[in-house]
Image: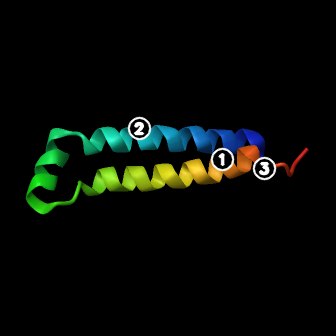
Amino acid sequence: MNKALSLAILIAGIILLVFGFNAGDSLASEAKEALTGTPTDKSIWLIVLGVIGVIIGGIGSFSRRGH
């Protein structure tokens, strides 16, 4: 995988994680969590996609393979 593309995926993953954690701390998410015990679907998806982006981007950015 191209190093620039891997770095872009890594940065996008970090941004998604930040948005996911911020969405998890929102008033709507806290209200839903108080009632149902689970955070909103939006915050869960942002965090999951962020983790996937960080893993894929990190592996691609820091792998020794390539020129």
Q: Mark 3: which secondary structure?
A: loop
Q: Position of residue 31 (x, y in %)?
A: 11, 48
Query: Tags 1 and 3 in contact by the CB under 8 Å rule?
Result: no
Which part of the image, by quadrant, shows the C terminus?
A: top right
Q: What is the number of the mark on residue 18? A: 2
The amino acid at mark 1 is: Gly
Residue that numbered label 1 is attached to: 58
Residue that numbered label 3 is attached to: 63
Left or right, residue 9 beside residue 51 = right
Residue depicted at x 60% and y 42%: 10
Residue reaching furthest to the right = 67
Query: Tags 2 and 3 in contact by the CB under 8 Å rule?
Result: no
The amino acid at mark 3 is: Ser
Q: Label 1: few (<14), some or many (≥20) within 10 Å?
A: some
Q: Position of residue 13 (x, y in %)?
A: 52, 44
Q: Mark 2: which secondary structure?
A: helix
